Amino acid sequence: MNTRRTKKQSYTIREVSQITSLKSYVLRYWETEFDELRPKKDRNGNRTYRIEDIKLIFLIKKLLYEDKYTIEGARQRLQAVQKSGQQLDFSFDRLRKEDAAFEIKKGLEEILVLLDQSNHPESGPRKVTVVADHKKKKSPKRVRQPALPDNLTSVSSNGMHVPSDTITD
């Protein structure tokens, strides 16, 4: 039996949206901004993206989101690559892995910001960046809570620990 997987020839905008982690309206907007991104349309007028289109989307996403180009800057960069005759010869799997790593990093940064806000709600959000550190770190030591003296075993109505002989009903 032949178990070899065949890659699809074309993808819908919904599939490309899921593959690239971009909203479909972003993909449609990019079509208006980047002349290189022109997916074909089927008989019903639905967009059909080829692998080359998806690679280009990953490249545009990298230029805009990771390299922080403006749309105009990314457009100029793509045109410069085309004029120089360089091929956009990137492996689809490599682009997908790089994009997944970027999405994970972005998610971790968002989690750090949320954690920082919950630890310091009065100070507001602060810029937090994730730095890859592959050195093994020692786990932090646990801090034990000091034991309460025997005479502080009662809790008053306001939640404070007080000596048991001072509480009156």
Image (tube, rainbow, N blue to C red):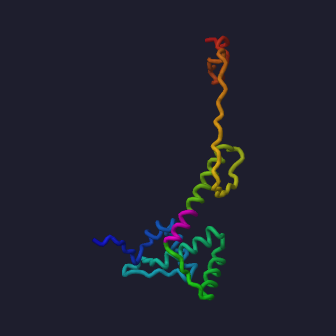
Residue 31: horizontal and vertical position, in percent?
Answer: 53, 78
Q: Is residue 99 above or below residue 144?
A: below
Residue at 70 percent across and 52 percent down: it is 126
Q: Is residue 2 left or right of residue 100?
A: left
Residue 23 image position (x, y, % from top left): 51, 66
Q: Residue at x 59, y 85 (%)?
A: 86
Picture quadrant of residue 146: top right
**Residue 28: image x %, image y %?**
51, 74
**Magenta span dominant secondary structure:** helix
Residue 36 on the magenta span:
no
Query: Toward the viewer: 36 or 6?
Result: 6
Q: How many marks?
A: 0
Q: Is residue 2 left or right of residue 13?
A: left
Q: Quadrant of the C terminus?
A: top right
Whether residue 96 appears in magenta in the rendering, the answer is yes
Name the one closer to the observer, 58 or 95. 95
- Work out which quarter of the rendered image holds the N terminus and state it: bottom left
Residue 73 occupies which quadrant of the picture?
bottom right
> Residue at 63% of width from left, 24% of height from top?
159
Which range is magenta? 93-102
Residue farthest toward the right in the current orientation of the protein: 123
Residue 6 lies, with reference to residue 18, above or below; the image says: below
**Residue 155 % position (x, y):** 62, 20
Q: Residue at x 54, y 72 (%)?
A: 58
